[in-house]
Image (tube, rainbow, N blue to C red):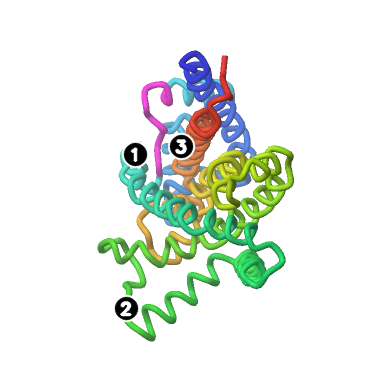
Amino acid sequence: MLRFIAFRLALIPVVAFGVITILFVIFKSVPGDEATMVAGATATQAEIDQIRIQLGLDRPLFTQYAAHMGRLATGDLGYSSTFRGNPLPHILDRVPATLALMAASILLTVLIGIPAGVAAAASQGRWPDLVISSVVIGLLAIPNFWLGMVLITVLSVELNWLPSFGAAGPLSLIMPTIALSARLIALVARMTRGVVIEEMRKDYVRTARAKGLSAKATLSRHVLRNALIPTVTVIGLQAGYLLGGSVVVERLFAWPGIGDLLLAGINVRDYTLVQGIAVLFVAGFLLINLVVEILYVFINPRMRYV
């Protein structure tokens, strides 16, 4: 297990290197001059040329790439026009807010999605299954930004129960969490239902019931453990997507996270800021996948990594 973890951790810098290289090529291919964006609309051509020299944009492309990789090795992402310097400290300041939103969304998903899926599977074809399945279809069809606007209108504007923007306290986390996790809850519930139904049709379930084990005990002791592996996989993948998928929700609720900062960087074409956040997303996604694979062993002890 330790060798496997060490190997996967060693892959993170390799993948990050590839992502950085791809982003560098993309940003250099995008029309527009970075020096012009930094200088501003009122700058003269002489001032723009001076900034190009300062940023090293007058050098050959390979030289710019080598210098860029050298700076990244020391934690310097480069010059950000938004923060007038290295944006790394400002990005890291936004990480706790995004992690809090992601953790709350995953917790809500686990507490609602898995039990809902198990309940639907246990009552297959009856009214609880029909109700849960209908709600799942509805949540899958609702965009998170539309749900967020409805929550703001009802819970904040009309009823004045919750704050509509910012991170003023625990109450501020409720509406962004619901808007971000609604679709994930539906996905997990649908996945859990399908997997539990499939597991309940297998021979080991019939054998357990033939030995006198109750349906409830069979479901909790045997079926649920086997069904959790694909469900945890879905949750892990979606948790990785939450890092980048929270952009719209964070902007809608003015949540001070990385997604809101990413959108701000895109709006002003701050390539340095966007690249730093993108690399952070990739590293976070890889770490989440590693955690999911470790959880497999705890869910099913028969699984081993060599």
Q: Disc 2 residue type?
A: Trp
Q: Earlier in the sequence, mark 3 or mark 2?
A: 2
The one of 95 and 116 positioned closer to us in this rendering: 116
Structural crowding at the residue carrying mark 3, measured as other residues with C-alpha within 10 Å and reported as few (<14), some (14–19) or many (≥20)? some
Q: Which residues are magenta?
A: 71-80
Element under disc 1 = loop
Estimate the x, y position of residue 112 in percent, counting from the top left.
Answer: 49, 59
Q: Earlier in the sequence, mark 2 or mark 1?
A: 1
The one of 92 and 127 positioned closer to us in this rendering: 127
Q: Disc 1 residue type?
A: Gly
Element under disc 3 = helix
Answer yes or no: do the residues labelled 3 and 2 have beta carbons within 8 Å?
no
Q: Main secondary structure of the magenta part?
A: loop
Distance CA(mark 3)–CA(mark 1):
18 Å
**Circle 1 residue:** 85
Mark linked to residue 181: none
**Circle 3 residue:** 280
